[in-house]
Amino acid sequence: MDCVYKNPNEPIEARVKDLLSRMSLKEKIGQMTQIERRVATPSAITDFSIGSMLSCGGSGPFENAMASDWAEMVDGFQKSALESRLGIPLIYGIDAVHGNNSVYGSTIFPHNIGLGATRDADLAQRIGAATALEVRASGIHYTFAPCVAVCRDPRWGRFYESYSEDTEIVRKMSSIVSGLQGQPPQEHQHGYPFVAGRNKVIACAKHFVGDGGTERGKNEGNTILSYEELERIHMTPYLDCISQGVSTIMVSYSSWNGRKLHSHHYLITEILKEKLGFKGIVISDWMGIDKLIEPRGSEYRNCIKSAVNAGIDMVMVPYRFQLLIEELTSLVESEEVPIARIDDAVERILRVKFASGVFESPLSDRSLLDIVGCKQHREVAREAVRKSLVLLENRKHQSKPFLPLNRKAKRILVAGSHADDLGYQCGGWTKNWQGSGGRITIGTTLLDAIQETVGDETEIIYEKSPSKETLERDDISFAIVAVGEKPYAEKFGDNSTLEIPFNGSSIISSIADKFPTLVILISGRPLVLEPWLLEKINALVAAWLPGTEAQGITDVIFGDHNFTGQLPVTWFRRVEDLDQLANGVKLHDPLFPLGFGLTYAEE
Ligand code: GLC
């Protein structure tokens, strides 16, 4: 007679109870351990009954590995897990935060800040569904998404990972969870994890809580708010994720009123688990336990004790897992960490694994491989790009609004650092953690899209930084200048000057002095726009970080579609104004207010 936990017809809670009762302390702590692929060995996975693995940004089988190569790799690790005494499958996680962005050839969707400009919950859900398919095609079960931060200060290096400064917009876009995991049935029990089978993934709402509200936007900094404001501004989106059956929630590196979230028993256990009724996995962030005390990793035993006792169920170690297992085992044996806390953590982990179906389908489904980067998904991404664009300025030229552009114009100058760079379009968390420039994957740059859109008679001159001769020509109909930020992630994106990089402003100035000019800004956040710049140019579009489908931009600037995007964040007038943002206050006298966005009907 097969044991209860192996029987998919048994209720999940019965399977959890049965399996837990069979586990040794070593196996329980092994399940609480998540390790990075570079330190994983078949024997460690099997002997320790490792519960989870991850690839940090870009940590794959090899450079430009395809989904099939990833599936081969993940299946290999999984087979080692299945050889453990109780055969508990592992769940493999990755930051698929705007498509399956580490895997070559995947569809790369606009980053969250652009999706926030769409305010389209249905689109978010469709993006989630497409992402889930491309993630599962690569053998991966789990994505550390969505980030439901409410970003309050553009100086924050993770501003673009947030949908908006407005809590209600973030709540609306959290619908991506039911795209990623599937829509729970009406009778689904509140707080329980839900994953609708092998075409869906385990999702992760992050980073709990207040990561987007730190002082001066400092990454991993301190959020100073009353509990009521913390709950109203930053915690509400978690209610929406939990009501959609989100399976995991990742704890923030940041602090609330000086207390680090990773050891915050009140917020993790009393609020998230007890008051909000969350029954899935609370996972630490990468080395989140090591970072509890500076220097990082010191007093590790005490940090493990406070983090696990605070309510963290799974530890994204990700490297020193033997030490974690040793210390946590010792803490349980000395009763500094109650076995009841371990059992709660393991119950949650097993609950998510049973709910996700990974016991029944532990290995990849190679029939999904053709779906990676498929036309349908790229069409969804193209639609998202269209809807994410925000028209900030559209002056009259020759007695009519400058946009839409004439696709039959005689000669168009295309210029700027971001006109022909797929990597810049995608931003951070693409191909690798920080992102990079160049033709990093399969996709369409703005220049590619312009070339595909204009008439056969139209000549395109492309110069990243136009020469003196070009600037002296008198036969150019108009210029399209794409400038913006280079890719970055996390603390490497913290920035207190927010100028347009790569001399963007001076390139704009030199071109706009000579020709009617459209400026397209490719950035993860509002940047400084000098008054003279707005005077000189004819039109300005905020395109955020659009990803691989830049035809979405030409669809709109050449008039096949209208602008519908609205600012998901306030556009500051001067960078000095940002210091007003302390304690949750909003900017007064902005350059462009939250919600601003012109259409072709307005000038
Ligand atoms: C990072 C990020 C988190 C990510 C994790 C794994 O440091 O804070 O968002 O999911 O580590 O890459």
Image (spheres, rainbow, N blue to C red):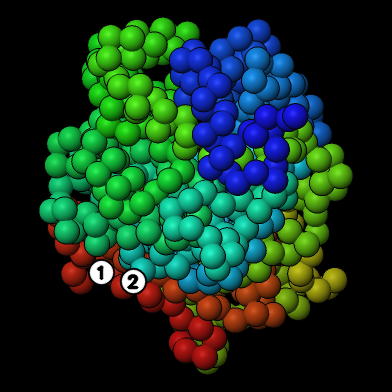
Confirm or deny contact between disc 2 and disc 1 (CB under 8 A). yes
Q: Is residue 75 left or right of residue 314?
A: right
Image quarter of residue 477 = bottom right
Q: Is residue 456 left or right of residue 526?
A: right
From the top left corner, tell me how far across and down residue 386 is, in percent.
61, 70
Badge 1 amino acid:
Pro
Nearest the viewer among 63 and 278 is 278
Q: Is residue 391 left or right of residue 257?
A: right
Nearest the viewer among 413 and 562 is 562
**Any mark on residue 594, and which?**
2
Picture residue at 47% right of the left edge, 25% below the top: 32
Picture residue at 78% right of the left edge, 62% below the top: 376
Per the image, label 2 sits on a secondary structure element best described as loop
Mark 2 and mark 1: Cα distance apart in space: 9 Å
Label 2 residue near ligand 1, CB within 8 Å:
no
Which residue lies most toward the front here? 1
Label 1 residue near ligand 1, CB within 8 Å:
no
From the top left corner, tell me how far across and down residue 139 is, in percent.
73, 36
Nearest the viewer among 195 and 76 is 195
| Residue at which label 1 appears | 590
Per the image, label 1 sits on a secondary structure element best described as loop
Residue 236 is at least partly visible in this image: yes
